Each structure stands twice: as C-alpha cells, then as structure tokens.
C-alpha cells in the first residue's frame, strides 16, 4: 500500500500535542497524532497535572483543611484517610478527561495512531505497536512527548517506599513520615499535600531558597505555612545516598546528616521523553536532560520539525504547553497567531496556592524601575472570613509615576482563579485606577484588588503636592 501522507504529524497527546493538532486541523490540514499509551492525554492527564491537582482537592476535602479555622484544628471529614480514598476521585477525573480529549480529536478529524514513534529521517516517522511497524510521511512534525521523572543512581527507586512523582498514588499506604527530595514545584506541591494529611515531612533542597522564580514575599509566606504544618526544611542540603532499612528509609546527606522516614519521594527535576524517538535520524540534538532546543517559533534545528511543551523545558506548565503547541502549528502553516510569553500566568498548587504574573520586586529593583506596592489581606475581606482563609494575601506592584500595573502576586485560597482579573488589567496596560473605579461583587475575594489598590495609592499620596492632578484614593478600612 502507498505510504500515508499528512501535513502534520504530532508525536504526543498531552496539552501541547492536542492543541497543535486541533489548530492545524482547524486550518484544514491533514493531521495525525501519535500516542504511545493506550489512553490519550499524556503525562498531564494520566500521571501529572490532573492526578496531582485532583489529589490535592481530595486531600483538602477529607482533611477538612478549609474549615479548621472555623470548626477547630481537630475537624476533619474522615478520620483515617487512605490512598484508596484519593485514588477513587483521581481515577474518575482521569476517565472523564480522556473521553473529552478523544472526543475533541475525533470532532476535528484527527487521525490517532497508537504506538511508539521514531524518526526515519526529517519527514518520515515509523510507528511501532503490537501489529508491527508502519511508516508515515509528513511535511511538518511536532514533537510534544513531554517529560518523565529524572532518576539518580544515588536514589534506588523501588515503587514502594522510595518513589518518584508518578508513583505517589501507587503507594501501599499513606506514610506517617516522609522525606521529599527536591524543592521545585512538584516537590513543594506534594510536600504540602502530605503535610495537610498530617504526615511529618522533611524537605531536602540543595538551593538556599525555594521557588526562586517566584516573588520572595510569597515564598516566605508559604515557608511560614510549611513550618506551621510541622514541615522540616533542610535547605542548602544535598542527598549523598539513600538506603532502604527494615523499618523505612534513610537518606544520607552530603553534610553527613542522616534522616529517616517511612518513605521517600524523589522529585528532583524531570527528563525529556526522547529516548525512543531516534532524533539523530532527524538531525536533532538534546541537552543532558533530554530537552530540545527551539527558536522563538518553536522550530528545532530542522526547519520542518517543531517542539513544544515540557520537552523544551521551563516553565513546564500545562497552560503554557497548550499555547506553545497552538503557536507552533500556526508558525508551521503561516497562520496569523499572536502570543506574548511575558503575559503567561503561573500557578503553583501548593497549600495555600501561589499564582502570579508580571514582574517581581526583585526584578524591578534590578532594572531600576520606580515602583510601589499595595497589599490586601484575606482576613480584611469578608469572603476571606467566610471561607475560613485568613492567611492569604494579594500584592499589586505598579509604576510610581504612571500607575501602570507591573505585577500581581497572590497566595491563598483560589489564587490561581483570582489572578485572572489582574492578568487582564496587566495585559491591557491598565493602571491602578481601574481597581479604584471598579465595583466588585460583595462578598468576593475580588475585593482584594480594590483594597490593595487603596493601600498602594495611599502611599503615593504622601508625596503628592496639593495642586497635583493625580487622583487621591478614598479612605477605606482596608487601605491601612
């Protein structure tokens, strides 16, 4: 039979792959999507984003976390929380998301091929499965294979009590004590989840600061919550070896400290899923972590091959991967698509959540930009009291002279949703006056924006002359 030809072959069905395939199909291109697993969705749906965020919601529900400030620290929905309780909810969401993904691809006429993809040359791909091998040809290829947990010869993963992030829900039981190696986003999220379940967590991170790409004030607030949840943080420490013992796990640190626990979670980085792609045949190289280098259009060393999503590295966010896939497909077929990475939001699903967009105080200080800050605390907002979250805060960073919003940083309940109001104002080059003049529903956490705006602009009013034209903010009880 003649070789099947496509305009675009997408390798990987995660967020980047799905969006790229659909974007090309919308442009009337013949598209094939290759997925190694029997189920669609890639790491995002099956082992990463969706399972971890669903697990987080299950943890918050069963532990009664949101209601402890109201009903007392002993309040919980279920006394003995098991792995099975968490898995039940996770599996339900995964099944639904897989069905949604398959339906979307089918509606757009995308051919789904199951098997392991490998390059023959820059325009030909072989798919190997239980039925044999089949070759396909495409004008363009997009690599969106995502990542897998990084491994270390120092940490013997056994899938029981020494695990990686893909194996959390495969643990036989919730441990009473846990060592988490790695203070990145994944390590921090699981640290918070287990601490909320009452697990005594020891966090080991070789860097002197957690989440160094986020605003320092938000990270400090999160660190306070971790300590309040009895998390022990070992910063500037590195694991030299890990050994399994008769009653648990021992981690030996390079500083000659020894720490023990029932289990250990190794969450130090991720590796690109490129081992089986035969990239050499396509003339593509990767770095030591399996990441593929691309230009601003997500084009690799080969002009007809693109890459998007986690396989190209930071920021490795599902939302960003979706956009990268969409843009990559658009660039391949010369579609008029526009996107600005500077306006991408970040969401970190720790407990409490952290979300931000724009510049941090540290960045603006380094750039010599004159800025001011306005802060609102959830405890000053009626919705914060109603929800039982009295520790959250929202920070607005703005230009002292133009009042333009430069950054929005939030920690607290619903931070990832609440951020979108500030995102819209920032992307549209809005000023702090928008928040002063806008009426928000009451009682909602959106009121934090108005309170933070008053707080920040009141600081400027001290320097204004009586004859100035700048508008002075009104006095409110939340602007102190």
Image: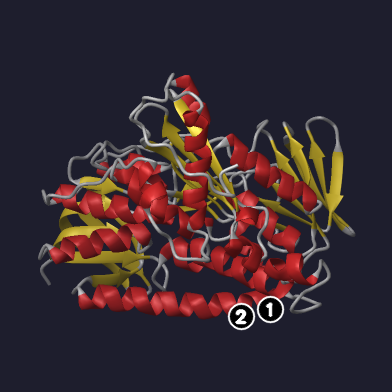
Badge 1 local density, few (<14 within 10 Å), some, or many (20+)? some
Using the image, tell me which numbered label, if any, was put on residue 250: none
Using the image, tell me which numbered label, if any, was put on residue 88: 2
Residue 129 found in image quarter: bottom left
Seen in the picture, residue 269 relative to 399 is either above or below; the reply is below
Write down the residue under mark 1: 84
User: Which residue corresponds to the image point at 29% horizontal and 70% vertical from the top-left?
Assistant: 113
For this rendering, which residue is in front, 172 or 154?
A: 172
Q: Position of residue 204 (x, y in %)?
A: 73, 42
| Left-right relation of 217 to 432 | right
Q: Position of residue 307 (x, y in %)?
A: 30, 47
Q: Could you tell me if the residues under marks 2 and 1 are in contact, i.e. CB atoms within 8 Å?
A: yes
**In what quadrant of the picture does the C terminus appear?**
top right
Q: Position of residue 266 (x, y in %)?
A: 67, 50
User: Which residue corresponds to the image point at 65% horizontal and 63% vertical from the top-left?
Assistant: 385
Can see residue 352? no
Q: Helix or strand or loop: what does disc 2 sit on?
A: helix
For this rendering, which residue is in front, 321 or 140?
A: 321
């Amino acid at each position: 039979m003649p070789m099947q030809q496509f305009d675009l072959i997408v390798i990987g069905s995660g967020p980047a792959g799905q969006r790229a395939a659909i974007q090309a199909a919308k442009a009337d291109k013949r598209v094939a999507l290759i997925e190694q697993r029997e189920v669609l969705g890639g790491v995002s749906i099956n082992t990463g984003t969706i399972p971890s965020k669903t697990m987080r919601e299950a943890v918050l529900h069963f532990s009664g976390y949101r209601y402890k400030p109201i009903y007392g620290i002993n309040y919980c929905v279920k006394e003995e929380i098991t792995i099975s309780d968490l898995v039940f909810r996770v599996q339900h969401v995964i099944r639904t998301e897989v069905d949604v993904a398959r339906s979307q691809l089918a509606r757009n006429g995308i051919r789904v091929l199951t098997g392991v993809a490998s390059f023959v040359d820059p325009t030909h791909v072989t798919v190997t499965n239980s039925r044999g091998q089949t070759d396909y040809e495409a004008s363009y290829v997009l690599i969106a294979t995502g990542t897998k947990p990084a491994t270390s010869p120092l940490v013997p993963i056994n899938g029981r009590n020494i695990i990686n992030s893909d194996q959390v829900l495969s643990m036989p039981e919730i441990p009473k004590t846990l060592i988490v190696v790695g203070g990145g986003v994944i390590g921090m999220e699981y640290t918070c989840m287990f601490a909320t379940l009452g697990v005594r967590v020891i966090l080991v991170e070789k860097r002197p600061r957690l989440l160094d790409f986020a605003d320092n004030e938000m990270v400090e607030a999160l660190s306070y919550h971790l300590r309040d949840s009895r998390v022990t943080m070992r910063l500037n420490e590195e694991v030299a070896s890990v050994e399994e013992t008769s009653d648990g796990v021992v981690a030996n640190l390079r500083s000659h400290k020894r720490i023990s626990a029932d289990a250990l979670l190794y969450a130090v980085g991720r590796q690109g899923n490129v081992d089986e792609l035969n990239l050499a045949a396509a003339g593509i190289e990767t770095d030591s972590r399996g990441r593929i280098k691309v230009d601003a259009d997500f084009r690799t060393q080969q002009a007809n091959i693109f890459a998007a999503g986690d396989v190209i590295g930071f920021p490795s966010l599902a939302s960003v991967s979706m956009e990268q896939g969409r843009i990559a497909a658009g660039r391949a077929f010369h579609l008029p698509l526009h996107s600005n990475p500077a306006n991408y939001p970040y969401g970190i699903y720790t407990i409490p959540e952290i979300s931000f967009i724009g510049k941090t105080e540290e960045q603006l200080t380094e750039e010599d930009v004159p800025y001011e800050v306005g802060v609102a605390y959830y405890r000053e907002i009626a919705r914060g009291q109603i929800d039982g979250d009295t520790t959250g805060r929202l920070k607005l960073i703005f230009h002292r002279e133009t009042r333009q919003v430069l950054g929005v940083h939030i920690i607290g309940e619903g931070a990832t949703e609440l951020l979108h109001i500030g995102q819209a104002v920032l992307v549209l080059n809005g000023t702090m006056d928008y928040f002063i003049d806008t009426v928000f529903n009451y009682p909602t956490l959106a009121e934090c924006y108005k309170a933070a705006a008053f707080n920040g602009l009141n600081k400027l009013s001290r320097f204004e002359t009586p004859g100035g034209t700048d508008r002075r903010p009104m006095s409110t009880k939340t602007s102190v």
